[in-house]
Image (cartoon, rainbow, N blue to C red):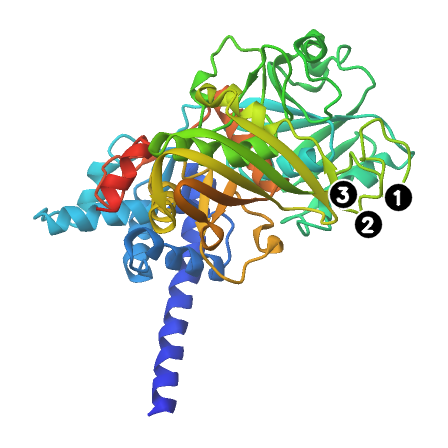
Amino acid sequence: MTIHANATHLAMWLEREALAEAMIPLIGRLYRTNNVVTSIHGRSLINKSTMNILKAHRFARRITTEELRLEDTAPLLAILADLDLGAAAIDIGRLRNAYDHAAAAGDTRTLEEFLRAELADIVGKGGHDERTSTDVVLYGFGRIGRLVARLLIEKAGGGHGLRLRAVVVRRGADNDLVKRASLLRRDSVHGSFDGTIQVDEATNTITANGIRIQVIYSENPATIDYTAYGIRDALVVDNTGRWRDEAGLSQHLMSTGVGKVLLTAPGKGALKNIVHGINHDTIEDSDRIITAASCTTNAITPVLKAIHDRYGVAHGHVETVHSFTNDQNLIDNFHRGDRRGRSAALNMVLTETGAATAVAKALPELAGKLTGSSIRVPTPDVSIAILNLTLDQATTKDEINTYLREVSLHSGMRKQIDYIDSPEVVSTDFVGSRRAGIVDGLATIADGHHAVLYIWYDNEFGYSCQVVRVLEEMAAVHPPTYPTTHTDTDTDTDITAGALLATHTA
């Protein structure tokens, strides 16, 4: 009996593997021919393996309580591939849910008829993409610069949207170009680059997955003629951190071919600090310089907004346990900052953080309500923020966890907030997370008006994903998104966080 059951389970698994394998060329054709990005409840399917596709289908049970069946998505993908679509972002998990709910409500249309109606605006458009391409220049090629490069290369598609055109660095050695390419190819934390990389020292270019990146050597951000390389009206991403105010960053605008500047660090003065998912809608066409705030600000602000919307935050303290960074010394040596001169590899280092006060730049209603500090620890990536909050409205651990889980799945902040309740997770489990922060539900403490929340975050990759989202807003290069219909299990993305508790936890 046991042998027969094992054989049955294995046969079912092999059938599912075969269906997932058959989906890969359809996903690829839609992406490369039609500029269609497919996903399952926000999990991208582009360039994913058979196993990743199977995992994405299993993830769907967190949304609908049931695993998404490949028997349902495989024919849907086949139909999409035959519709000769125009550019779009299509969530096939949500699209299948919309069809099933329509059918349950009495809709007698076939799947193809439903899809033709739902996607009517792009059917037969043959990959047409109304978006204009925007040139991107990375000024600096350190930890964040290289991860942003990986993300831009991954999202290149058919060449529309954001186009990585150049990297600007100071020459560090005779074989500088080869070393830069090697650092892009190999990463001790994030693993090998997913693709191929070629170096052409004669033209100072790196070609990664067909994307030709001009490497420009310069000591001065104000004197570069980008148009000499065919680059015009570019978005310059300054990830050096050398300049954080408008005067310093305005040097980029003096170079020929630059349109706007994004700083990958907290800005000073009146510069807009943007946390995507919170205040990205304040970006205006007239903004020439904005900042993407810090990794910690991006991790905690969405969770704080969700909590403040539902319970009200009277005051609180933010403590971050943060992986060490290049700003610190490997062994004891002089450093202008307090304590940061002591060995990062050997010590926990108590230091300051501006993240608590920086939250107010994206979320003004919390101005003056938060304090913060940080402990740097000997790990290379992934940090955790501890939010010790006094709330206006009392709650319980189960209630606040249920609410935050629903926010992570159904709200407009679902790209920023993730939720997990595993008793075994540790920091390395979150390397490569594309969310700004992940709520650790089992660690939550809530007793009346007092709550303590633990938020994990990949302070490198998760933050880089937020940076790219801000770039897409600045360039206005979002494709149309489908489905446009919504169901009880597919809550509209602009639902307010405060409404979710009543909606999902009656």
Label 2: element kind: loop
Q: Is residue 336 visible?
A: yes
Q: Is residue 114 left or right of residue 443?
A: left
Tag 3, which secondary structure? helix
Q: Earlier in the sequence, mark 1 or mark 3?
A: 3
The residue nearer to you, when weighing 25 against 420, is 420
Disc 2 crowd rating (10 Å Cα; few below 14, some 14-19, many 20+) is few
| Vertical arrangement, residue 496 with respect to residue 92, above or below | above
- Picture coordinates of residue 329, whole percent (x, y): 84, 39
Of residue 431 and residue 479, the one placed in the foreground of this image is 431
**Residue bearing the label numbered 1:** 331
- Amino acid under label 1? Ile
Front: mark 1 or 3: 1
Which residue: 30% across, 42% down? 83
Name which residue lies at 46% across and 55% down.
442
Residue 172, quarter of picture: top right
Q: Residue at x 18, y 44 (%)?
A: 113
Residue beneath label 2, please? 346
Q: Quadrant of the N terminus?
A: bottom left
